[in-house]
Structures are given as C-alpha cells and as structure tokens.
Image (tube, rainbow, N blue to C red):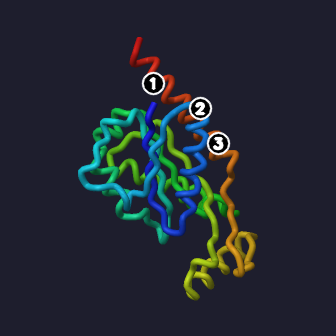
Amino acid sequence: MHILMVYGTKEGQTATIIERMAQIVRNQGHQVTACSVKEIPAAFATDTFDAAMVGGSIHMGAYPPQLRTFVTRHRDWLNTAPSGFFTVCMAIQSKNAAERDAAKAYGSRFVEVAQWHPQLIETFAGAVKYTQYNFITRYIMKRITKREGGSTDTARDHEYTDWDAVARFTRQFLETITQMEEARTK
C-alpha cells in the first residue's frame, strides 16, 4: 500500500510525530509519502495513494489554515479512502479534565466542519519549544507549563509526546486499512 501522510505544524513536533508514524508503516512493508501541507501543490493528485493520515497542531485554538484547505480540497477522496486524523495539543495532558476534553474536541470539531469522516481520530501532547519562542510566547508558555507541573527550564525544549500512544495509534490505523481492504475485496 502507498500511504499519504500530511501534516500542518508550527514548531515541528507534528512533523516529528508523522516521521515516527511513517517509520512504523514502512517497517510493515508499506510505501509512505510524508509532507507538510505547505509543500502540497494545488493540483496534487491523490489517486496514487491507498490511504491517508493527516495531523495538525493547535496554536491559539486553531489548526494551520493550509490544513483545512487540504482537507476541504480532498474531502471526497479522504471520505472514500481509509483515513486517520490526529491533533497535537499540549492541553491533552492538563491536570484539568475540562481542558483535556476541550483538547480532544478540537479534532472532532475540525472533521465535522470539514465534513470528513476519518476512521480514527486521536490527540497527542506535543512539545514545549522554548528555544523557538519569542519573549512573550516563552513567558506565556512558561506560566502555563508551570501551572501544569511541566519543566520551566527555558534554556531547552521539552518533549511531552507519548511515543507508545503514537505507535498504538499507527498500528490501529494499519489494522483498519487491512480490515477495510479485506472487506472491499470480499
């Protein structure tokens, strides 16, 4: 199978997650094309792919605008091919249950508005990339991270992604593809 993996990211953690997923998929013998939504031309052809995984990070309550454009433009194909969607949002590991619920809701709202029906949806924590932030963002992120019990060492970045959860989600996606393909050929 040839699987398209598309991501929208600001500081790069979503790309790192896609790269890890792509390696798992390749290790299972499948071909992967992974790319940023910023790299995809408007005339991009999806007919050479058998499935898609799409991921996007949340910043200030929104996904990268190019991610919505990609999903809307290719919605018909995404709704017929096996597909999965994941969100990268630090609030998923909040101590506050309402904030965790809100983090999970981003993905559901996104696909609902886009009229896309992926088989799998998940939310992962990302990273706090202090070294990439401007002064004000660093200050805000340090306050939020301190409140949540994370590291406030601004001299380096801190990764909070649960790599075991990423691997489980990726394996579940591959199982879904296999089940859909078996059902289609019966």
* Residue position for label 1: 180
Kind of residue at badge 2: Gln
* Residue position for label 3: 167
Task: Rate crowding at label 2 as few (under 14), some (14 to 19) or many (20 or more) other CA atoms within 10 Å.
Answer: few
| Residue 87 visible in this rendered orientation of the protein | yes
Q: Regarding mark 3 in the picture, which secondary structure is present there?
A: helix
At 62% from the left edge and 85% from the top edge, which residue is drawn?
A: 139
Label 2 or label 3, whichever comes before in sequence order: 2
Q: Position of residue 186 (x, y in %)?
A: 41, 11
- Foreground mark, 2 or 3? 2
Q: Quadrant of residue 16?
A: bottom right
Which residue sits furthest top?
186
Cα distance between the residues tagged 3 and 1 = 20 Å
Give the left or right position of residue 169, taking residue 81 as reference: right
Cα distance between the residues tagged 1 and 2 = 17 Å
At 54% from the left edge and 51% from the top edge, which residue is drawn?
A: 18
| Image vertical order of residue 96 relative to residue 180, above or below | below
| Image vertical order of residue 7 relative to residue 77, above or below | below
* Residue position for label 2: 28
Task: Rate crowding at label 3 as few (under 14), some (14 to 19) or many (20 or more) other CA atoms within 10 Å.
Answer: some
Kind of residue at badge 1: Met
| Image vertical order of residue 162 relative to residue 133, above or below | above
Q: Quadrant of residue 159?
A: bottom right
| Residue 108 visible in this rendered orientation of the protein | no
Kind of residue at badge 3: Ala
